[in-house]
Amino acid sequence: MSTASSAPEGRAEPALSPVPETALWTLYYRAAEARRPDTVLRDPKAVELVDRHDFPFEARFGPVKPALARLQALRTAAFDREVADFLIREPRGTVVCLGEGLETQYWRVDNGRARWLGVDLPEAVELRERLLPTGPRHRLLAASATDPGWLDEVDPAQGVLITAQGLLMYLRPEEVHALVARCAARLPGATFVFDALPHWFNRLSHAARPGEGGYQAPTMTWTIGSRALLADPRTVPLTARHGWFMRVLALDLPDRRARLVRSLGPLDLRRPRRRPSG
């Protein structure tokens, strides 16, 4: 399937379905935050990709909202820390990125020895292969995260970390539960890192109107209030609380003990005051 179609001013615009299109949106916002002198996420690869990619980002997604860009970058930084910690423990381990999109984490935290596997829908992989060639030891697999076949591509001998950044909220609760159960059965000893949103955020997204360029985020179908995944009494309590937007969590497999990596709320969106020069 071709991902290119005609666009205003002769620009090449990928004709992506809603969930894969979020890869372009997150790239746009990540690069915007990375350009700031006081950024919370240094991501020169994202800036480079936005600058050279012939896509009307602002026309499609509207002007960047700085607070939202910061939130996205803080989430990404939390994932980066987990991957970096894993690579200290298992320097030749495998990092599996489910729904990798146009994420540039490989260029931020790779240690020169680890193996990386990006798993995404065929149209998203086609876009990534065209815009962001893989680095050494980095493979791409065109498949849904819910397809058990990708597990056959993972060598657990040196340790495995699975990440699902900005993905699970677009799956059905039963798909999330099945995915984690399958990883626990096939990759015991692995860690599954993911982000989750509260019920109220989901309701807010349903009520949101399309932006200036007609873009609207896909419908979210799984939130932190879904108990199907985290029903095990050994896990930490994860009920929705007022004042937070997003949580990044890590499940140790196969027992599925949950560890809170980062909780993001309104205070995180307040930038520290810049020190006066001199």
Image (tube, rainbow, N blue to C red):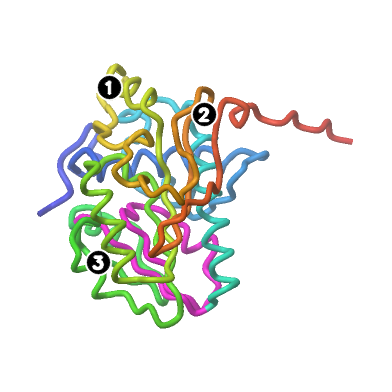
Nearer the observer, 245 or 218? 245
> Secondary structure under badge 2?
loop
Which stretch is magenta?
92-121
Residue that carries the numbered disc 2 in the rendered image: 244
Residue 97 among those drawn in magenta: yes
Q: What x and y, as percent, mark residue 151? A: 26, 70
- Whole-angstrom CA distance, mark 2 to mark 3, is 34 Å
At label 1, the amino acid type is His
Vertical placement of residue 58 versus 91, above or below? above
Name the quarter where the N terminus is drawn: bottom left
**Quarter assignment of residue 179:** bottom left
| Nearer the camera: disc 1 or disc 3 | 1
Query: In the rendered image, which residue does mark 3 sit on?
Result: 141
Give the vertical position of 61 relative to 40 (above or below).
above
Q: Residue furthest right?
A: 278
Which label's residue is closer to the chain start, 2 or 3? 3
Q: How many neighbours does mark 3 have within 10 angstroms: few (below 14), some (14-19), or many (20 or more)?
A: some
Amino acid type of disc 3?
Leu
What residue sits 46% from the left and 38% below the top?
238
Mark 2 vs mark 3: in front: 2
**Mark 2 belongs to which amino acid?**
Trp
- The x and y percentages for residue 4 are 17, 47
Between the residue at mark 1 and the residue at mark 2, the CA separation in whole angstroms equals 18 Å
Of residues 55 and 132, the one drawn nearer to the viewer in this rendering? 132
